[in-house]
Amino acid sequence: MPTPKAEPAPSPTARPGAPAAVRRVAVLGSAGSIGTQTLAVLDHLNALHARGEHPTRYEVVALATGSNAATLAAQSRQWPGAALAVASPAADLPDGARTGPGSPADLVRDTAPDLVVSAIVGVAGLPPTLAALELGADVALANKESLVAAGDLVVRTAHRTGARLLPIDSEHAAIWQALHRADRTAVCPPCTASPAVARVTLTASGGAFRDTPADQLAHVTPEQALAHPTWDMGDKITIDCATLINKALELIEARWLFGLGNDRLGVVVHRESVVHSLVAYRDGNVLAQLGTNDMRIAIQHAITFPARALSPAEPLCLSALGSLTFEEPDLARFPGLALATRVIDAGANAGAVLNGANEAAVGAFLAGRIPFPRIAELCAHALDDTPAHNIDTLEDALRADAAARAAVEHRIAGDA
């Protein structure tokens, strides 16, 4: 991974032509779980600013959603003046909203925000994320698929423009905070972990089926898979947590955010979801980041970095927890997790293939077309079936994504 010297990152409140105390924000995926919580955090921070307790005021200049036009309309009333986009055709579009698959990226280009919260689910989040980075805007990243599908392209673009990638995923936000860095203003990139870092361990809740015997997994239903034990998330990511493919995607994301290889990445199952990740150093010290199961904490940290503002979340009470548990993941029951190692080693388009195949397979499972264990199997087959090529452009990534989806559909048709 290239690590050229980056220009000094701008302060979180500074942008030419804008007052120092105002930051202009675009929220992509505003109707989803992360998007709605982001808007709640911005509202909270603005209340702190009004009381003189936080130096920055946030102006929402753009809101984009996949298809939930009703929620977008309600949000536009709360944040008047925000430009609007709906990626998929929808009834009752708010006045002035643009529509179409390219509309979120166009929205970013036209509004030129200081900060883009990228929370559109899936590879659909890649074009607007790249558009933001091309402008040099900071990106608070909840769309891990952008780095999974086109990590090298995304990082190279950020290097070139001086944009910062600020992780929102709780695991990567934890790693970011636990890493010792001489310069904490340049976040990602460059993010090549020091040789002093021996290992980074991501924690996993284990998902809905962490205690389900292997011989029962072929009979579980989508409704059961969507019953996550500790987090409230959207359907796709909740299924990914049940297969542990979400953790595979997060390992690939960590590879790009922090410059780590398979030899320094690992996963441990932590049922309580209180320890969000750990960084072990070669001198024997291990730093862990703990917090309540509330995504507003990670969202706010990315938005306010390097400042720390009063949190809207309940504080962590260690005495109420009683105990914390850790165990090795069961790769025999959840083979999708092991696909991360294969993808990181392979490079090229392997991440885009895994991501596209997984999105297609999860959709097929939710539609009742395949059993649960078939998701990981189809992802592995797609990696076998799709020729390798480099990801040098957005079109390269989307071509690999389409090929992976076609490979999955071909296999499903063969099962019928």
Image (spheres, rainbow, N blue to C red):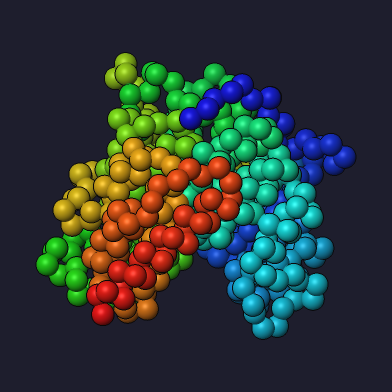
Q: In which quarter of the image is residue 238?
A: bottom left
The answer to whether residue 194 is seen in the rendering is yes
Above/below status of 22 relative to 69: above
Residue 135 lies left or right of residue 200; in this view the side is: right
Q: Which of 159 and 258 is in front in this view?
A: 159
Q: Quadrant of residue 158?
A: top right
In the picture as drawn, the residue positioned furthest to the right comes out as: 17
In the picture as drawn, the residue positioned furthest to the top comes out as: 283
Q: Nearer the viewer, residue 365 or 296?
A: 365
Q: Quadrant of residue 413?
A: bottom left
Above/below status of 119 relative to 52: below
Q: Residue at x 64, y 25 (%)?
A: 6
Residue 77 lies left or right of residue 246; in this view the side is: right
Q: Which of 175 and 37 is in front in this view?
A: 175
Q: Residue at x 35, y 66 (%)?
A: 408
The answer to whether residue 208 is seen in the rendering is no
Q: Which residue is drawn at 34% across and 48% down?
A: 248
Question: Which quadrant of the figure contains the C terminus?
Answer: bottom left
* Residue 205 pos. (x, y %): 31, 53
